[in-house]
Amino acid sequence: MNGSCLRRLLAAVLLLAQAPLLAASPPLELHVELDPATRRFRAQAHVSAAVRDFRFELHESLQVTAASAGGKRLPAERLDAGGPIRAWRVALPAGAERLTLEYGGTLPALDRRLDHRGVLRGLTLMASPEGSFLPAGGAWYPQPAPLFTYTVSLSLPGDQRALVAGRLESEEVPADAAGRYRARFEMAQPADGIDLMAGPYRVREKSVPRAGGGPLRLRTYFFPELDALPGLAEAYLDDTQRYLARYAEEIGAYPFTEFSVVASPLPTGFGMPTLAYLGAEVLKLPFIRATSLGHEVLHNWWGNGVFVDYARGNWSEGLTTFMADYAYKEGESAAAAREMRLGWLRDAAAVPAGSQQALAAFRTRSHGAAAAVGYGKSAMLFVMLRDEIGEDAFRRGLRGFWQAQRFKVAGWRELQAAFEQAAGRSLSAFFNQWLERAGAPDVRIAAAHGGGTQLVLTLEQAAPAYALGVPVEIVYGGGRSEIRRVPLTQTRETVTLALAAAPEGVRLDPQLRLWRVLERAQQPPILRQWITARAPRLAQASNDAGVRAAAEALAQRLFENPPRAASLEDLDRSGEPMLLAGLHAEVDAALRRAGLPPRPAALAGRGSAQAWTLARDDGTALAVVSAQDAEALRALLRPLPHYGSQSWLAFDGGRLLERGVWPAPGRLVPVDRAP
């Protein structure tokens, strides 16, 4: 995720809407003292104010103690008394260009209870010896403009280390914990916020040469137990170097002087200028360096090198997903890339129609329905765009967008203009339909007739029609096949194709290169349908109070909307997605009484708990969570919500043993022979 929290995003939207960008970014100079043990925070801010009536925000835990300009003390007025963020105002005298503010207070404590959903909904300020995080949107400094440069000087107890995004100008490391750690950072490029991280970090560093500039400083800030894992920090430094070189070649030179991987005590995944802030437990996972790390490195170009115009939609997450997560799958194999595209389409299909939004309306991933659009549909737009204009034009468009918008605020239309210039033609119809319309086209093969080497193909789509190039696989005898792109701009069109041999069958978009409503045969039930359900139901198979309490807690964590209780008699009735939970024998008995399919044989006896989905003939979706005891159910509270794209899972405590999606290959439409 790019940026630190939803509040920062909303603040940026308001700032961009209320104030024009200044020709020169006004600087901010901060001097910060932080004591994580007592949570005491003190700061002095020197602000180059662009207006005489300077208004700013501070968290409710912080109070302005002094304000001055040109040696004259000024009153600081708090404008409101409600809410966690308070508005302040200082009136500067005529001719004053620099305001000095002194402020401080006791910060909130680190909230260890936050899970990934709590983090996504926005973080406030938090301090602790275990780790402190002051997100940009938490209002811990007076922001002078939508985009600004800054310097930040930090002072902390000797056993702590801290950083903000930017170039490390100086650093004083004390001989022991009795001294003070001091560091000074400068951000010379325009930024839209400042995030501060601190903790009992062990710091490792690697200097990397780069063409056309000074060396890059690469660092890890890991907690002691994380840093002690053999080779882990070195591997992160090496992989960071590799990703920086990759994206500099694909897009343009890396725009900063350093990059750090910083451990968080919470399950965060934030990309900020010059650093990635990732949960300490996540950093231990071997696949993170091959996936999430590259994603966050790439955000230094998309989101932190070119800023997102949130008022017109967030393009950054989709483009970053396409060039990082999806590109890694393409490098692995064509099958792995197809599997990711299938996952995007299945995730979207699991979102209720009323919860779908247009891509232009996506701002941030606050829930699963938004993620299916802002990440999946957005990344698929770039897959389709590359297919539409070709690889070379696509690469020119990316580099042109970077060169034109570097350290500017840009939206989808600036992206469109860059690709139009690279392609040499208008792409308005393409971008308009994929950005402005919610949902996806519902396309099907209505008829296929063949006579000799001729194929008469009729395609249909729901109204109002999209303008599509529909990939159709034509299957011949002996297992041979070819893909043709068939234009479809009306709700029903018939085309005649000349072929080299007599076809036996046709299949709609088998490689899944078109954003569309999947055929029913390609939509096995996945847990996302329960996670995003608007009115989910919970049926309890057990009468034991402890088991029922664990199942209720699990449902509250799994569903994004509160579930309502249902009886076991409801299992054979249609309605909103339902979760059946209980102990193994009780679940088996409930399924048997309802006449529903039994526990899948492949899951029987696997681990301490299993979860699986099934779809009834009437379309009603049922998910089952079965455990050996109440403790095994409670162990699923943290991991299970992370697996929305899966159809079945087996756990040993909180550890995943196996997972998968029920097979759904799609259907081959036979070609009718002309009489």
Image: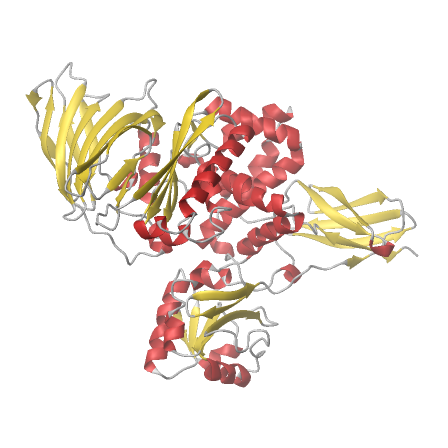
Residue at far left of view: 73
Can residue 562 be spotted in the picture? no
Indicate left or right for 167 with 215 as reference.
left
State the quadrant of the N terminus.
Answer: top left
State the quadrant of the C terminus.
Answer: bottom right
Position above or below: 305 against 279: above
Position above or below: 515 against 578: above
- Residue 426 found in image quarter: top right
Q: Where does the image place residue 468, in percent across and percent down from the top left?
A: 67, 41
Nearest the eye: 234 or 152: 234
Tell me the residue at 7%/20% (across/down): 72
Q: Where does the image place residue 127, in percent across and percent down from the top left?
A: 21, 47
- Residue 169 found in image quarter: top left
Q: Where does the image place residue 193, in percent across and percent down from the top left?
A: 31, 34
Position above or below: 193 against 68: below
Can residue 549 be spotted in the picture? yes
Q: Where does the image place residue 212, in percent across and percent down from the top left?
A: 47, 20
Tell me the residue at 21%/44% (across/down): 159
- Residue 90 found in image quarter: top left
Tell me the residue at 16%/46% (across/down): 39
Indicate left or right for 625 with 196 as reference.
right
| Colour pattern of the rendering | secondary structure
Nearest the eye: 107 or 348: 107
Nearest the eye: 90 or 633: 633
Q: How many marks?
A: 0
Indicate left or right for 487 with 95 as reference.
right
